Image (cartoon, rainbow, N blue to C red):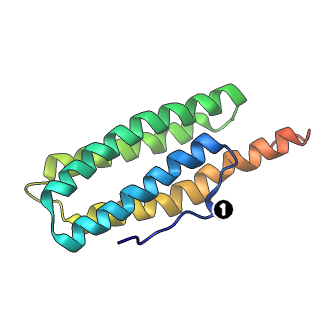
Amino acid sequence: MTLMLWDETMSVGVPELDSQHQTLIALINDAYEAIRKHDEHLMTTLLDQMREYAAMHFHFEEEYMRQTGYPDLVSHRELHDGFNDKVEEFQQQLHSKTNFSQVFVFLSRWLTAHIMKEDMRYTRYMAQKAAGGEPA
């Protein structure tokens, strides 16, 4: 069952990053499915996928920011580190304390708070830079 769908309001204007963000939406949908089915195996697999997603995506995104001179790279990297820390916490507590819905809520909030807010900052920066203006 699909809970969230990608739409153009989520686009950061970089096709590869948009594709990677679509992967996050798929992970959110998978988390919802694991909750619905009470499927611990699926949640374990999902947490492994989240770790793999984060490593690949964050490296790509941070390199893009570095190459384009994005001034808030360091603070953005700290947000990524927080995501990684939370995924590790979920993995360590999966069999003892982690509730499936915690993972779903975390991913959903990450989508809205990080992609729709934080990532859109570099989108605006790059648009201003491309237009020849002084990026804010």
Q: In the rendered view, does 98 fall on the left or right side of 80?
A: left
Where does the N terminus fall, quadrant-wise? bottom left
Q: In the rendered view, does 7 fall on the left or right side of 21?
A: right
Q: Nearer the viewer, residue 103 or 5?
A: 5
- Horizontal and vertical percent for residue 46? 27, 51
**Residue in the picture at 40% in, 34% down:** 55
Which quadrant would residue 74 be assigned to in this image?
Answer: top right
Q: Nearer the viewer, residue 90 or 18?
A: 18
Q: Secondary structure at mark 1?
A: helix
- Horizontal and vertical percent for residue 67? 67, 26
**Residue in the picture at 20% in, 56% down:** 42
Which quadrant would residue 126 be assigned to in this image?
Answer: top right
**Residue in the picture at 26% in, 49% down:** 47
- Horizontal and vertical percent for residue 35? 23, 69
Report which residue position mark 1 lands on.
8
Where does the C terminus fall, quadrant-wise? top right
What type is the residue that disc 1 sits on? Glu
